Image (cartoon, grey):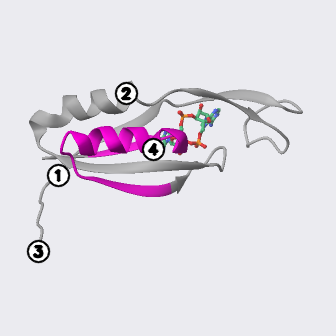
Amino acid sequence: MKLIFAIIHDEDTTVVTNKLTDQGFKVTKLCSTGGFLRAGNTTLIVGIEDNEVEEVLNIIKQNSKSRIKPVTYPLPIGVMGNGPVEITVGGATIFVINVEGYEKV
Ligand code: 2BA
């Protein structure tokens, strides 16, 4: 079994979640905040069988868009200049984790 953590744009949450649940996948949505931009994003948790990983990754990839975000003063640590600068965020940052155990009680 695998656990997918997918960090996506808030704006993509509805479509990604709907597509996953339409295909019968169970999804938990967490409200999260990026450490760099300190802006809201969404983290989806999806528990699946090993043979479902490709399908889930495809759904996330096909429905997560990258976006250019203007960043104004104060700039995040490590970004040079007086702002504004543009930073490309997303489509999605995805982690696939092996699950040792799974129980529903
Ligand atoms: P943030 O940390 O707010 O990062 C937003 C965007 O800022 C990143 O987009 C990247 O384009 C840029 N960025 C991040 N750190 C940077 C740095 N040190 N210097 C220059 N630019 C930097 P994405 O890479 O698409 O990441 C979107 C969000 O996904 C991140 O929001 C964070 O919440 C999450 N994320 C990305 N990689 C991660 C990782 N390895 N572990 C945990 N979360 C991650």
Callout 1 amino acid = Val
* Residue bearing mark 1: 99
Please give the name of the residue rendered at 13% of the width and 55% of the height, measured from the top-left corner.
Answer: 100
Residue 53, picture quadrant: top left
* Residue bearing mark 2: 61
Of labels 2 and 3, earlier in sequence is 2
Please give the name of the residue rendered at 48% of the width and 38% of the height, measured from the top-left corner.
Answer: 12
Q: For the residues marked 4 and 3, what is the alpha-carbon distance in whole angstroms?
A: 28 Å
* Residue bearing mark 3: 105
User: Residue 19: x percent and y percent?
Assistant: 31, 38
Q: For the residues marked 1 and 3, what is the alpha-carbon distance in whole angstroms?
A: 17 Å
Q: Do the residues bearing badges 1 and 3 touch, measured as CB atoms within 8 Å?
A: no
Read off the magenta span.
4-31
Of labels 4 and 3, earlier in sequence is 4
Of labels 1 and 2, earlier in sequence is 2
Callout 2 amino acid = Lys
